[in-house]
Image: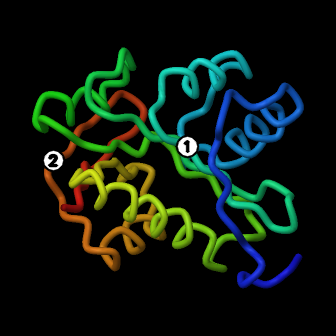
């Protein structure tokens, strides 16, 4: 593994090819419960098709992480997305951030978020997301707090709970 200075952002220009989708799906599943489990590669592909903005984080052209984001007005049916749809006119919603285990705490997430912030600032959009509080994802809560995300709500589900966060 290289150091974080070799990490770079690549934008999804189209729906990724099948072999790339397989990599993304495997990364997603390896990052549960921090991100929601997906039932299939087709579900991942559908998320990407509905989404507005997506980036890879690469290390020597190898995918080590990704982010999938939605804007207002999407046909996405997530209850977490709906929370922000009901409370914000315009926004950028982070549906999932996935970083390969051995790249965590090495700057990959910061790289993704910094790039996302630049895009959001250009369009004057708040960035919205949720983080698990049960089971607790303390690393993510600390990361978002450090990056000035504020709590705007919370929700309990049958099998987990989340806090809703927003950054202007």
**Where is mark 2, residue-wise?**
153
Frontmost residue, 107 versus 5? 5
- Describe the colour scheme in one phrase: rainbow
In the image, what residue occupies the spot 25% across and 26% down? 82
Horizontal arrangement in the rendering, residue 43 relative to residue 162 (left or right) = right
Circle on res. 83: none
Q: Quadrant of the C terminus?
A: bottom left
Q: Is residue 94 above or below residue 73?
A: below
Q: CA distance from mark 2 to mark 1?
A: 25 Å
For numbered disc 1, what is the local secondary structure?
A: strand
The picture quadrant where one finds residue 78 is top left
Q: Is residue 129 above or below residue 43?
A: below
For numbered disc 2, what is the local secondary structure?
A: strand
In the image, what residue occupies the spot 15% across and 47% down? 153
**Where is mark 1, residue-wise?**
54
Horizontal arrangement in the rendering, residue 145 relative to residue 17 (left or right) = left
Q: How many marks?
A: 2
Q: Is residue 31 above or below residue 122?
A: above
In the image, what residue occupies the spot 63% across and 70% down? 108
Provide residue 35's location: percent of width, then percent of height.
54, 44
Horizontal arrangement in the rendering, residue 73 relative to residue 115 (left or right) = left
Sequence-first tag of 2 and 1:
1
The picture quadrant where one finds residue 73 is top left
Q: Is residue 68 above or below residue 115?
A: above
């Amino acid at each position: 593994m290289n150091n974080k200075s070799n990490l770079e952002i690549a934008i999804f220009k189209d729906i990724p090819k099948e072999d790339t989708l397989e990599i993304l799906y495997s990364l997603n599943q390896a990052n549960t419960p921090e991100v929601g489990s997906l039932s299939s590669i087709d579900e991942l592909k559908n998320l990407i098709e509905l989404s507005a903005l997506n980036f890879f984080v690469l290390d020597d052209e190898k995918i080590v992480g990704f982010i999938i984001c939605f804007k207002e007005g999407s046909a996405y049916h997530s209850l977490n997305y709906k929370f922000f749809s009901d409370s914000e006119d315009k926004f950028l919603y982070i549906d999932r951030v996935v970083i390969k285990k051995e790249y965590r705490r090495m700057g990959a997430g910061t790289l993704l978020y910094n790039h996302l912030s630049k895009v959001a600032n250009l369009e004057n959009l708040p960035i919205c997301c949720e983080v698990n509080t049960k089971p607790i994802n303390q690393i993510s809560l600390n990361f978002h707090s450090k990056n000035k995300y504020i709590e705007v709500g919370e929700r309990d589900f049958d099998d987990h709970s989340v806090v809703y966060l927003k950054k202007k």
